[in-house]
Image: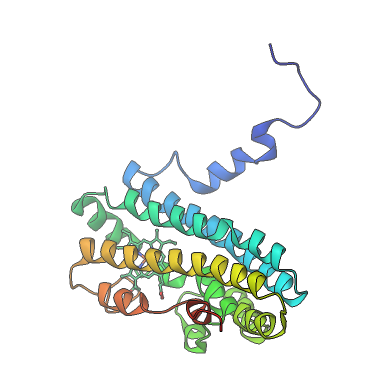
Amino acid sequence: MIAETAAPPYGQVLRLDELLRTARVHDDDVDHVLFLATHQSCEILFAIALRHLEEIRAALDTGDADMAVRRAAPLPRLMATLTRHFDGLATLTPAAFEGIRAALGDASGFQSAQFREIEFLCGLRDSRYLKTGGFTEEDRARLEARLAERTVTEAYRHFVDTCADRAAAERVRLALLEFDDAAAVWRARHAVLAERFLGTAVGTAGSEGAGYLWRAALRRMLPEVWTPLP
Ligand code: HEM
């Protein structure tokens, strides 16, 4: 028998009532639940990734290679989890997807401000995305702040240029490469998923659809970590 403790129980610590009410997991039809809750889950993982990227930048700026590697370690696993989420969505029937799409209107992951924050924070800064329809004023303010702040790429470049310990620098490069490799796989899986459901049709945000995502799949969050150190 497990003893009673004064500590708040699991459900309270995780604020599960609030979380599941927000996720509306008991309201919509089950296909919508899979689709929407998967996106919500992705947004939580994006938020976790952002926190880790900020910590990596801070570690690189203080020359702490071990901390940078430690904070980078979960990132490829988070990206792989995000990729598995696409596998789950691929089980929707075409009819179920069409029903969801009709209900979605213009809403699209393209309007994920956090995803754009990840790109901007890494150094993939394209201010044209600030004009993305559907962003709130708050989203835009956060993204503008990201455009003005130091990027992980800048911190990495400075770290590599000033680090006397080449083995440590290489460990950092490989840890960041693991993340970017997993991000590239996520992008490609996303394009395949869009192709599966949309074929050559345009996306809900009005882009070329799968064609846009295939081009985006060539982008790298941290292009410099793909080049071996001298
Ligand atoms: C059946 C599921 C999905 C389909 C068919 C799909 C399709 C698309 C398409 C066609 C675009 C291009 C913009 C547009 O015109 O809409 C896009 C962008 C995007 N989607 Fe999805 N998506 C799906 C699921 C997801 C999920 C689960 C996420 C996670 C949050 C997500 C995140 C994004 C992001 C971040 C972008 C912008 C990518 C970039 O600009 O590089 N998508 N999606």
Give the x, y percent position of residue 5.
78, 23
Q: Residue at x 49, y 81 (%)?
A: 227
Q: Please say whether residue 108 is visible from this viewpoint.
A: no
Is 97 or 211 nearer to us in this picture?
A: 211
Is 162 or 71 nearer to us in this picture?
A: 162
Quadrant for the C terminus, please: bottom right
Look at the picture and state if 55 lies above or below 27: below
Give the x, y percent position of residue 182.
44, 63
Q: Please say whether residue 30 is visible from this viewpoint.
A: yes
Relative side of 221 to 88, left or right: right
Look at the picture and state if 21 lies above or below 200: above
Relative side of 152 to 186, left or right: right
**Snapshot quadrant of residue 107:** bottom left
Look at the picture and state if 98 lies above or below 166: above
Count the labels in the image.
0
Give the x, y percent position of residue 121.
60, 77
Ligand 1's quadrant: bottom left
